Structures are given as structure tokens and as C-alpha cells.
Image (tube, rainbow, N blue to C red):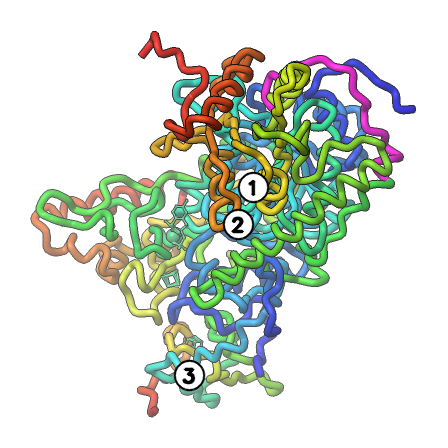
Amino acid sequence: MNKTTELFAPGHRGCAGCCDALAAKFMLKAVGENCIVVTPTGCLEVFSTPFPESAWNVPWIHSLFENTAAVASGIEAALKALGRKNDTKIMAIGGDGATIDIGIRGLSGAFERGHDFTYVCVDNEAYMNTGVQRSGGTPFAATTTTTPAGKASFGNLRPKKNMPQIMLAHGSPYVATTSIAYPKDMMRKVKKATEITGPTYVHVHAPCTTGWGFDGSKTIELGRLAVQTALWPMMEIENGDITGVHKIRNKRPVEEYLKAQKRFKHLFSIPDGAEIIKKIQELADWNADQYDL
Amino acid sequence: MSKLTVVEGSYAVAHAAKVCRPDVIPAYPITPQTHIVEELSQFAANGEIGACEYITVESEFSAISALIGASAAGARTYSATTSQGLALMHEVLFNASGMRLPLVMTVANRAMSAPLSIWNDHQDSIAQRDTGWIQLYAEDPQEAADMTPQVYKICEDSKIMLPAMACFDGFILTHVYEPVVLLEQDLTDEFLPPFAPEHILDPSNPKTFGAFADPSIYSEFRYMQELGMSAALKKIETVADEFNEIYGRYYGGLIDGYYLDDAEIVLVAMGSVIGTIKDVLDELRAEGKKVGLLKIRSFRPFPTDAIRNAVKNAAIIVPLDKSISIGKYEGALCTEIKASLYNTKIDIPVLGYMFGHGGRDIPPERIKKIVSEAEKAIVNGITIESSYADLREELL
Amino acid sequence: MSSKLCIGGIVEPGSTVINKTGSWRTFKPIYHHEKCIKCGICELSCPESCIIKTEDGYYEIDYDYCKGCGICSNECPRETIEMVLEEK
Ligand SMILES: Cc1ncc(C[n+]2csc(CCOP(=O)(O)OP(=O)(O)O)c2C)c(N)n1
Ligand code: SF4
Ligand code: SF4
Ligand SMILES: [Mg+2]
């Protein structure tokens, strides 16, 4: 007999220590039963709904990889037309690939149209479901299976696409960044996002044991390090203004974070590794400065 | 007595969609579908479609995706598209039928680019034949309008639950002004019951839609779609009859015939060219030629048995296609009719022609020429199984 | 699960509970309740939601689902949860 009362049920096939499973658990905890969830193709979708099973105790739909926001638009319009919207929350939960890359057209359209729903991007910084390929969310210098390091490459050449800023540019009344490493912060922001009328966006940083190469017991620890190094700033932006920033008490050097993961291991052996680590430190410092972390 | 009004074909269809009381209409404009969605936006803006939500999506990909969300949430949905828009939807078309969502979409048939063409042929919808959508083809604006409540009734049947395309020819039918009967709201309410799906996205009864299938159960879901299609074979016929009872108009069920019973030469076609062919046949019959027409109304499900039965006494069958399978050099009707006759005792030559691609006009003379070539083929046999009937050799 | 497939593949909520992921485990978390300060961090941190609060405010682990990831042990501020090699 299953003993938990959580809305995201156990028995799912997520890796031991899976970040996406934690994210799903926190989101449903925050929003409660009265919601409809849309999820694109990706780890979370595949491991939570192997037919004839489902980990979801709320109504849930998966259509395709790149159309989550449009499916959510249709649900919202239907509930309104049928007079069933009431307090029902519509929450789309997409991976970084589904959100930042292939699904951005539909997401942009849905936000521009102003549908009343919340989009949560669970950003594990690569296409995990298909075997850890690079996405627009993969950080600078990380290796993935399509940005391997080699004599002619130090891994991913580009920094992460600044998705929260893009969503902000759509005039969203609420854009927040958070991390699975800070469950209370994450739950508060997700709940708040769903309570605000209009299209709201929460970007969740989610360290993936399998894709980043660290022990499954460290999922939360790694998430904390990303925040403490200022590589992942956590904030809230309401109606265009930054209204809350998670302050870092003792800022850590980025090496601590990088060293803990296989995807950055090469930086500690290649000739220009120190130079690249310096650049990553600069990215972190820029964040700390820019957002007064 | 129903009142005739002179309206554009697009208006007749938009009006028909309106009286079906759709809850959600996500649509993206594309020639020659634009007038349909413009009319519907106006109806919605006037508050004439109840609480209907018209969504100005940013692409056809999102139009069809929003239809999926809306339908799963329990809404009756409508959209319209064509050509490039339909092709952009390709991936989602499979998804909708696999999820068994009874979406209804008008397709204003148009050629596929490249070369870019905004004019009519059937390449767009034919290219989607394997996506699991019901496809009916209308011959004139009235039939296109009348087909709209018919497809809702067909695809929302609990044994069918498949999406449907109501296809009618771009420009030729979408932009023609003709006297039509605009569908009456009261008759439509009598004909079409409200949409009441068994499962919807609802927090009080939380179901999971769109789970992931392993090899042990995948084929069974495909086969169940096929069962839905076979149920539709029957339903298309009964719905056409029910429509006739209530509105007093009938266009055939799966197929229809014109001078078919004693025809030696059977032309097979769908869409607006049916009208031209009928006129030509009136003339040829007056000359004593035994030519008939098999109109295909339902291309999916493909009415194999009805076709076999309709053509079994012919001397030659002549499918006329507004599509081409490049690399096979024949159109879809040609291929599928031949396939339908194989493994039967029916041994009738099939002589295929393609014409009217990219909007090329199909004058009556072209059809007469095809008939005379068919007459020769009855005597001399077939030398070329399939060819373009209107190729401009001088340009090649 | 019913023996017949539902049209469209609709699935019942929460039905993954039939899949006992406890069999995946290599290391087993052992909860030493005498060290526990009832902060609830382990419960919140478990991706399988298999750390269950008991009536006395302490916790127990539902080994039917525990995959042995060790997050609970790593996150516990008081080293209450010990990871030991599972005896199979
Ligand atoms: C149109 C399309 N292209 C590619 C794929 C293959 N695919 C499925 S999931 C996925 C990656 C998902 O990445 P992300 O959205 O980051 O989610 P994650 O699995 O990392 O949680 C890819 C590339 C697909 N299903 N559909
Ligand atoms: S690969 Fe990463 S995101 Fe995917 S199930 Fe495993 S831990 Fe979770
Ligand atoms: S080891 Fe992992 S799965 Fe097991 S109880 Fe601890 S956190 Fe949960
Ligand atoms: Mg990812």
C-alpha cells in the first residue's frame, strides 16, 4: 500500500535522485488538486506515465515535445467557454529543451495572447530524455553528448539563453527563478504564479544526476551550490520590477560547483581550463553584481 | 421551404460551423481559407457563437495543438486550414487521432509549395491520408456547409472518436458566390447533439491523457483507430440519411453515383470537379455514350466495399486525381482504387489521369478527351496506366 | 488496470504505485529516530515521497518505493539517516 498523500505518486521511473521528480512533487504540493497539468515530451513525461500507469493524481495531458503552451491555451479557452475555469489552475511543466528551444514559438504566442496559465520550465540544462544532448539552456563550457570536449573544443561554446528575460519581455505579470534545492522558495513562487491572473513564468534550476554526472544523493546539494556561487540567481519579477532576490550569505567560488560534476571535469585538465573557469567566475560575478545577490 | 441566400462559399461554411456551436476556435489565416476564419471571428465578436473562445494563435502548429487541449478539456472545437498550414500540422494530426479527440477542421484544399501556389488541388489533404483523420470531400459550397454538422456527428460518436477533415476546393468553392441554404440553428440543434465525451481533463476526476506506450501495446492502439474508422464507414451513411431527413438534402454517403448503374466507363473523382464532370456526362449520355461517375465522398475511411460494388460491371475505371505520388506517377484515387480491386474476382482495367494541379483549369473538353481515350483503351488495352491529362508538353 | 484498453489510452491517476521501485535499491537508508529533530527536511527532499511522517512526529521509510538515492541522508542536518549496502 502506498502511504504518501503527495499528489505526485511514487512508483515512477525517474532515476534515483531525480531532479524532475522533485520538481513535480513540489509543484503539485504548491498548487494542490484543483489544477490541470500539461507536460511535453521529456524525462518527466516518460518516467511518470508509462502506460497503463501514471504518477499524476491531477488531470494531466501530454501531447508533443513543442506544443505544450498551445495545448495549455486550448485548455484555458475551453474551461472559460464551458464556464468551468473558476479557480482551476492550468500549469504547463516543460523541460529546458521543450521550453527554450523547440517550444519557444508556441510559448511566445501563448504569453503574448495573455492566457491565464503558469508555465514552469524545469531546467536540467540539456536534453536528458534523449541522452544528454545540448540545449539552449546548457551552460558555457559544459560537455554534453553533442558538445563533447576534444582537442578543438572545450564543450558548449555559448552561455545559457536568458529565458526569464525573454518571458519578461512578453509583459508577463510574474516571472520568477528558483531551484529544486530550495523547496520552500520554489513552492511559494509556483503557488504565487498560479494565483496571479495571466501568463506567469517560473524557471526552476534542476540538477540532473545522470546528465551532469554526480551521485544521486547530491541533487539538492548541487542545486544549492549553483545558487551559492551566483551561477543561478533566484529572483521574483512582478510587473517588470525585481521585487525579491535570494541573497547569498557566503558566496562560493565556481570551482566548487564545477568540480562536483563530470560535465565540467575537462576544465581541470585541458590547457586553457583555468582561463575558461575564470570566464565562468566572471559570469557568476556579473550575476552577483547585476542582481545584488 | 428553406430560403436560398447568395453568399460566398467560405461564408456558408463559417456559418455552418457557427450553428454547430463550437466552444473553442483556434485558427491561423492562410489563403484561401482566410474568409472562413474572418467570418468566424466576426461571429464570435458579435457574440453570435455563445461563449465561444476564438484564439488568434501564432501558427497552425499551435492552432491544432490548442484544439487538442480544448477537446481534451471537453470542448467542441473547430478550425480551418489548407496546404502549408495543414503540412505544418502534420505531427499533431497523428497525435490528435491517436488521442482519439474528435476535432473538426475544414480544409480549403490548395497545392503544396514549391513552386509556391495558392490555387487548388488535393495534394495537401491527400498527403495526410495516413494520419488517422476522417476525410470527406465536398462537391459544392452547399455540400461543404452541410458536411460540417455531419462530420461532428460522425466523429463524436463514442465508437468512432476520431478527428475529421471536411475538405472543399480552395478558391473554386471557397470564393464562389452561389445561392445556398444557410444551415438553420433549430434544425442543427435537432440534428447534432451536444458534445459529451466520456473522459475529460477535470480536477474532480483526474485522468491522464497521452501516456507513453511500449511495444507490447502500441499496435493495439493503432488497431483500435482502425476499428473507429470501420465504425465510421457505417456512420457516414446513416448520418447522411439523418441529415436528409432533417434538412432534406443528400449528397451520397461514402460514395455517390451519376449514371453509374449501366456505365461502361466509370470516371472516379472527388471535390468540385464533380460538377464539371456531371455536365459533361449529361452531354455524352445524350450522345448515347455509356459513361458514369463515381463520386468519392469519403476518402478516409476508404469505402473499399462500396467501390467494388459500384464499379463491378464497368468495362474500364478512370480515376481522376488532383494529387500525385511523386515517384509512382499516379494520384491517390488511382492507387487506392487499383488496390481495392486486387484479390477480387473483378478484373477491370484502371486508367488513371492526373489533372488540375496547382489550380489549372479543367475544361469540359479535357474530360471528353479522357473519355474518348478510355473508349480506345477498352478496345486496345491500356498502354500507360497513369499520366497527366493536362501537361503542357511544349514547355518540357 | 482493466484488461481492455481504453480508447485513446486514458490512464487512471496515481497508478504508478503498483510499481514497487524499492527493488532498484543498492544502498538502504536506515533512519535513527533518536537523532531526529523532526525538521521534515528528509520528507520534503525525497523524490519518491516515501518518507512518511508517523503519528509521533518522527519518520519512517517506505521501502516499497525507496530507490536508495541517498538524498535524505545527504540533506539531514543531524546525520539521522545512514546509508548501508542493501543485503539482498
Ligand atoms: C519534434 C521532436 N523532436 C525531437 C524529439 C526527441 N526528444 C524527445 S524528449 C527530447 C529532449 C527533452 O529535453 P528537455 O525538454 O530538456 O527535457 P528533459 O528530458 O531534459 O527533462 C527530445 C530531443 C521529439 N520527441 N519530438
Ligand atoms: S536523466 Fe535526469 S531528469 Fe531524467 S529521469 Fe534521470 S535524473 Fe531525472
Ligand atoms: S534514499 Fe532517496 S528514495 Fe530512499 S527515502 Fe531517502 S530520499 Fe527517498
Ligand atoms: Mg532538459
Q: Is residue B47 left or right of residue B288?
A: right
Picture quadrant where residue B363 is located:
top right
Determine contact: label 2, label 3, CB under 8 Å. Answer: no
Using the image as rendered, state which of residue B119 and residue B241 is in the foreground. Answer: B241
Residue lying at 72% horizontally and 58% vertically, measured from the top left: B198
Both on one chain, marks 2 and 3? Answer: no
Q: Quadrant of the C terminus of chain B?
A: top left
Viewer-nearest of discs 1 and 3: 1
**Image-based side of A130 in relation to C64, left or right:** left
Give me the C-alpha separation between circle 1 and circle 3: 49 Å
Mark sitting on residue A63: 2
The residue that mark 1 highlights is B65
**Who's the residue at 70% across and 43% down the image?**
B236
Res B182 → quadrant:
top right
Subunit that carries the residue with mark 2: A
From the top left corner, tell me how far across and down residue B154 is, in percent: 71, 45
Residue type at mark 1?
Answer: Ser
| Gap in angstroms between the C-alphas marked 2 and 3 | 43 Å
Q: Is the residue under label 1 in contact with that under label 2 (CB below 8 Å)?
A: yes
**Vertical placement of residue B124 versus B103, above or below:** above
Residue B170 part of the magenta segment: yes
Q: Which residues are magenta?
A: B168-189
